[in-house]
Image: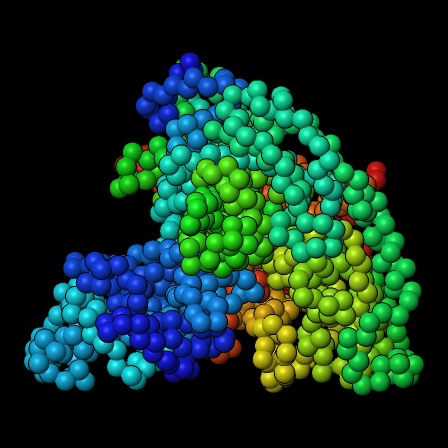
Amino acid sequence: MIEFKVNSESVSFDGDSGTPLLWVIRDHLQMTGTKFGCGVGECGACTVHINGRARKACMLPVSSVAGRSVTTIEGLAPDDANLHPVQQAWLEHDVPQCGYCQAGQIMAAVDFLKSHPQPTDEDIDNNIDNLCRCGTYVRIRKAIHRAAQLMAAGEKT
Amino acid sequence: MSARRQEVRLNRREFIVMGIGVAGSLVIGIPAAALAEGDRERMIGFFVQIDADGNVIIGSNQPEIGQGIRTALPMLVAEELDAEWSKVSVRQMPLGIVKTEDGYTWKYGGQGVGGSTGLTDNWDYMREVGAIARQQLVRAAAARIGVDPAQCTTRPGVVLCSAAGVEISYGSLIADAAQLDLPDEPPELKSVDDYRIVGSRRKTVDAFEIVTGRAKYGTDTIRPDMRYAAIARAPVLNAGVESFDDSRARQIEGVLDVFAIEGPKMGEPYFLLASGVAVVATSTWAAMEGKAALDIKWQESPSADDSSNKFWQENEAMLQTRGQVVLDDGNFDSAMADATKVVEHRYRIPFVAHAPMEPQNCYAYVQEDRCHVIVPTQMPSGASRAAARVTGLPRENIHVDMTRVGGGFGRRMPVDYVTEATLISQRTGWPIQLLWSREDDMRNDFYRPGGLHEMRAGLDDDGKVVAWTQRLASGSKHYRRPNKPDDELWTPELYPDDFPRRMVDNMRLEYFHNAIGLPRGSWRAPAHTANAFVVQSFLDEIAHETGQDPLQLRLEMLGEDRELGYSNHGGPTFNPGRLARLVDFVAERIDYTQELPKGRGIGFATHFTFGGYAAHAMEVTVSDAGELTIERIVAAIDCGLAVHPNAVAAQLEGGTIDGLSTALGLEITVKDGQVEQSNFDNYPLARIAAFPAKFETHILPFNDIPTGVGEIGLPSAAPALTNAIFAATGKRIRTLPIGDQLRRRA
């Protein structure tokens, strides 16, 4: 039995401990916001936070998160009226096209902005590597800058 | 109104209004037969529901693949309905078909997306849906007030009768309006000048659901008693299953069943892509583990010798012979003989994969007398036919629900995954969610055809192009399609009415088919991606080799505004002057005449795709080591009236990036009958770092007739890039992808 937290709630899994976290989240917990894209850690559609840091859930055996705290896209904002600044920026710039990769993009950007609160374009180029097949990169770049502004303004108030 | 109306009375109160839509598709409008009893009180026809508090729910009948159709079509309805956009929400409609005496017809209008037709096919129909709903609300209000409907008008969400000094909200009229018979006359439609929703910047209706992880894609389907399936498909093209040992697979906890699935024989149409062995389990992971534990012996394949090397050698050899002449304007041979200068080059376009972010998947539940399919697809009617073919059930007993689609790009026009899921459910009796791995998707695709293009132009003393030929050896996309004769395999690969038809007097197109065993299909802007690259690169080469300015050469060849006949998809006419205006605009915008240092260059290109016009200009640097940086991108589109400008810009951004990503590094190759690529590590889609922050999009409408936009922004991107690379380095890219061709060894 592997016990851990997902979006602050305690959960347990008693199946194959080698099952990737992604499939425990999607099939066992039936939380489908985190997506399957490649299964080899290349695309980032499955990005979640483990103890606050962005990780690719498709390659991570569930045993490795025992006792840890997992955050998925469903748990990023406390409620619909208080979206995370990154989600707000994504809405302002209307980033999604097909939208399939966007949960992973948002989770990656949230973690990135913790270490780069005022990112340059070069910082984004060097650190954001999630794939988007629709080519929403133009808006992702703008939305990351906008989220940084929103977060800086939020800290001042 | 363009629609021809015809009533089919089913019984006293229920009737369907049918019309022939602009694109020839049979559409059924308002009001509706078969509305559930309770719906009759709150819905006008199938598409419009208004709650008592004034919230408007508009049905969207088309698959949403990221092109924004779920926002654009409701904008048309809401515009004519005179609804408050802030009160509109959108509901996905299932496939709707109705049995008729001689087959099936659409219940909610034609459904399916491909060829950038989603908006144009529904432009008249959806506006009429909204206008009829508004008209019925006005009539209901007039009846209640006791005035003539002509004395009433509307403002958003409200019917007004100023003569009587009365205002009635839509919400309180819906029950009355839903009961009214339709008048015979078509409703009046707004003029473009009165639009307040169409043509304004609106956000994607599902954006909130997407950024909170709630939007449902095919992979997110969860149904009672559902089992999960995976298939181990033949690694060699066209190989069958000889035998398999599933003893290890069946030991994996959760694996329930294992059996073979037979694919089509060599040469048969692809109802599915490959033979394989299916594993059914209680979870996705158990199905994947079970698949990995299979020991399968494959039959010898007739494609075992196929390879990319062989394919290119065969194409070279074919070009030494005479092919099928599919266009021969003027007198090409004598014009070429008289030419004072001849320019000739060959260009190589690779096979590429669609690789949508959401891998193929499908839910199917086959029961004795019915079948339920839930699927992310571009072609729900194809899904219905596929399930009927497998089960033998009548199509009216097959219910197809559409989810949001995690990328289409043409891959989801075929419905092979529906055939597979239906077969597995039929065999096991369980509701089945079939999921492909990324490797399955990369190695089992309807690839964009690869081909070798030979271009030759003859010029006169003044540098004017007087003779032009394109000779193409390729794997046609219609290979193994039913009812496609061999002498028509060229039709999806060369579009004779494209530039420079009628701009060069003597023109010949020639085709050679290469029957390599790779499946192929429609890939966003199909042959336009190849032909725009080839033609726009070649024009640059002509300009440089004859000492002409590449912009002036294009402007002179394209000429003034005029409508030329265009019989290929996207017609009926093509106005080359619209391309001239766009390419002139992007060249000026990027300041193309500026002096640039060595290693820095500007290039541009323009192309007409499926009714829409686009141009790109790019500025690049190439370092001494050969490292390429795209410094700036200017993209422009002329799609007539931009109904949903936010999505037009998004499609232009995304199309540009798709074209560039593909040109930079993507190629599917074959060795010993096997596709060599397997995942994003060896099929490297470009990441954000490849694209500059200096990225402008411009929407420059020529008139107020809307065209589609999903494919228009892609074809001219790659040649603009390689023309810029030439300007920077003198190195001409004639083989895609660019890969490491610029890299210099130290």
How far from the left and from the top, in percent, is residue B588? 61, 69
Residue B290 figure quarter: top right
Whether residue B494 is visible here, answered yes or no, is no
B433 to the left or right of B500: left
Above or below, B247 relative to B504: above
- Give me the residue at 44% from left, 32% from top: A26
Instruction: Quarter of the image for the C terminus of chain B: give it.
Output: top right
How far from the left and from the top, in percent, is residue B528? 66, 65
B539 to the left or right of A49: right
Instruction: Quarter of the image for the N terminus of chain B: give it.
Output: bottom left
- Give me the residue at 63% from left, 78% from top: B567
How many labels, in total? 0
B244 to the left or right of B284: right
Whether residue B290 is visible here, answered yes or no, is yes
Above or below, B355 relative to B77: above
Q: Nearer the viewer, residue B740 or A58?
A: A58
Q: Nearer the viewer, residue B293 or A54?
A: B293
- Give me the residue at 26% from left, 81% from top: B183
Colouring chosen for the image of the structure: rainbow
Q: Nearer the viewer, residue A112 or B675?
A: B675
How far from the left and from the top, in percent, is residue B691? 59, 49
How far from the left and from the top, in percent, is residue B539? 76, 70
- Give me the residue at 44% from left, 77% from top: B20
Residue B274 figure quarter: top right
